Image (cartoon, rainbow, N blue to C red):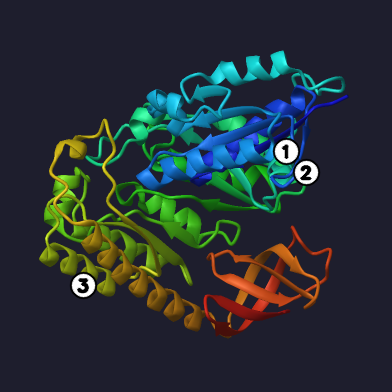
Amino acid sequence: MRKRLKVLTVGCKANFSDSASVVRLAVSQGFDIVSPSEPADVVVVNSCTVTHRADRDSRALARRARRENPGAALVLTGCYAQVSPEDRRALPEVDHWIGTGEPGTLASLLREIGGGPGGRGPDPISEHAADLLLGHRRTFLKIQDGCDFRCAYCIVPVARGGSRSRPEDEIVDAAARAEGDGAREIVLTGIHIGLYGTDRVGRDALSGLLIRLLRETSVARFRLSSVEPMEITEPLLAAIAGSRRICAHLHVPLQSGCDRTLSRMRRPYGAARYAEVVSRASGMIPDIQIGADVIAGFPGETRDDFEETVRFLRDVPVDYLHAFPYSARRGTESAGWPDDVSAAEKKERVARLLGLDASMREGFLRLQEGKALDVLAETVHHGRGELSGRAGNYAEVSFPGPPDGVGRIFRVRAVASLGTTLVGAAE
């Protein structure tokens, strides 16, 4: 009898891609993949460690998995498992602790546990098929891993290592195969995708990759995950502006709009450079939506520094924010500095940023009213006869549509904005 396996994920789009890789591996070993709500013989928790909250969420998910699957083999993998092996004693619920630096260990473990007859052998399912088994309608295709930067607050280079690019031929083959299996949106993801190709062919390889992907696929659209401001080049913007099949959406991490804080963070740009980059993107790409990450309460950030960030954000063409309170990470430079912003003050600053985020999102959606958008249907609402999903520019849209429309792209006219979504009508 084939054994059942499920994957639970904490963290970023790169982790979604890693979870899909676990699924592909498990299917090749003969396992049946089940949903998070179903009982399983093997549970893999793919963890995150970017903040204290991510650590806590990873531990909580592992403990809940044990309660819900008392007889399962429970595996903790991912960044938290890599960075904090000493926490293993505090998490006895976990049977197998496998960090990101042990790529072959999970494969060996699954072979040992045995999924039973019927494994697919060396030809695993496509990235799209794996994402469908995880409940994703978009395909997360990792093109790069690791990071060569050493920002003062960031533990990711410790967890993931230096930047490594996936071979271009391999990426193109994977994208074509995913498209052939029905993928209509492919998210190019990684830890620092703007570094793609610098270890192989040099600068601007990301734009070249996009152009080749367009040439060697026919219907799928491509979305970029986060791109650092200093890697948003003229060729990259030209590639995005030149094709409706590249989503008009950029997430450009900021972290602070105050030069003093950016310098302490060891970020390789100033606020003026960031403003120049996003303004150029906004000017070149019609209807683009631009997002930013911001850290509140970094050590040494004064009230005046924070207010400078707020003023900066009001003046640049950024349409939404991901706001986080600063979280010291053992093994980073800033972990040795006094954490001199109180928890209450961090909470207040994050609340201010979230309020700004809400007004940004509302303003962007109002500007979309009356426009025609290409929307990937990701969810069906049977009772209302509606589909919902993301437009190319990442606006969330609900619209009347057929119940079998999930996974297809519809041309939708945005009729009105309602809260954080657009209400549309299919054209």
In this rendered view, identify the residue nearer to me: 241 or 28: 28
Q: Which residue is mark 3?
A: 311
Say if 426 sits above or below 276 in the image.
Answer: below
Residue type, numbered disc 3: Arg
Q: Given contact means CB atoms under 8 Å apart, are the residues at marks 2 and 3 in contact?
A: no
Residue type for callout 2: Asp
Real-space CA distance between mark 2 and mark 3, rounded to the nearest whole angstrom: 47 Å
Regarding mark 3 in the picture, which secondary structure is present there? helix
Read off the residue under disc 2. Answer: 181
Tag 1 secondary structure = helix
Q: Position of residue 228 (x, y in %)?
A: 35, 48
The percent coordinates of residue 83 (x first, y second) are 38, 28
- Looking at the image, which residue is at 52% across and 75% down? 420
| Real-space CA distance between mark 1 and mark 3, rounded to the nearest whole angstrom | 46 Å
Secondary-structure class at tag 2: loop
Is there any visible trace of residue 208 in the rendered image? Answer: no
Labels 1 & 2 near each other (Cβ < 8 A): yes
Residue 172 in percent (x, y) is at: 62, 36
Q: Mark 1 = which residue? A: 177
Residue at screen point 25% across, 35% down: 150
Callout 2: few (<14), some (14-19), or many (20+) C-alpha neighbours within 10 Å? some
Which one is closest to the eye, mark 1 or mark 3?
Answer: 3
